[in-house]
Amino acid sequence: MVSERFERLFGRLVVAFKQHQDVPRTTANVVELGAARWVLEAARSEIATERDRMAPHPLNRRIVRKVNVSENDLARLQVFGVGSGSC
């Protein structure tokens, strides 16, 4: 499922690309082309961010360090109701 924000950003990307795809490289168009390129890059960046938000890559997940817990620590936690299975 694609979010509305992603669809809006992708539409903006397509419009910017179509408007400035075949613009002649004259002095008068340099500033306009620079602005269009900036909009295009900003849209690509936002699309990448939105894509990662919707479906994060497994390699981007934070690695959780495994910690050894002693029997004494575990027993203390169970006394306080943590890890005993009751809520």
Image (spheres, rainbow, N blue to C red):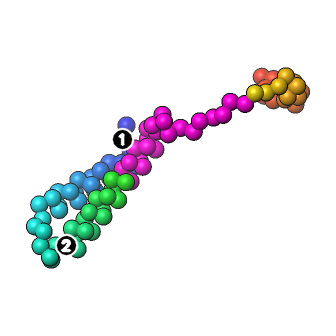
The amino acid marked with disc number 2 is Val
Between disc 1 and disc 2, the foreground one is 2
Q: Which residues are magenta?
A: 46-67
Count of marks overlaid on the render: 2
Say which quarter of the image contains residue 86.
top right
Residue 58 x %, y %: 48, 34
- Residue 4, image x and y in percent? 37, 48
From this viewpoint, is residue 78 visible?
Answer: no
- Residue 69 falls left or right of residue 18: right
| Nearest to the observer: residue 12 or residue 28 | 28
Looking at the picture, which amino acid does disc 1 mark? Val
Q: Residues within 10 Å of mark 1 (few under 14, many from 20)?
A: few
> Dots 1 and 2: beta carbons under 8 Å?
no
Around disc 2, counting alpha carbons within 10 Å, would you say few (fewer than 14), some (14 to 19), or many (20 or more)?
few
Residue denoted by label 1: 2
Point out residue 61 in the picture as x, y percentages from the top left corner. 53, 38
In reply to whether residue 30 is colored magenta, the answer given is no
SS class, disc 2: helix
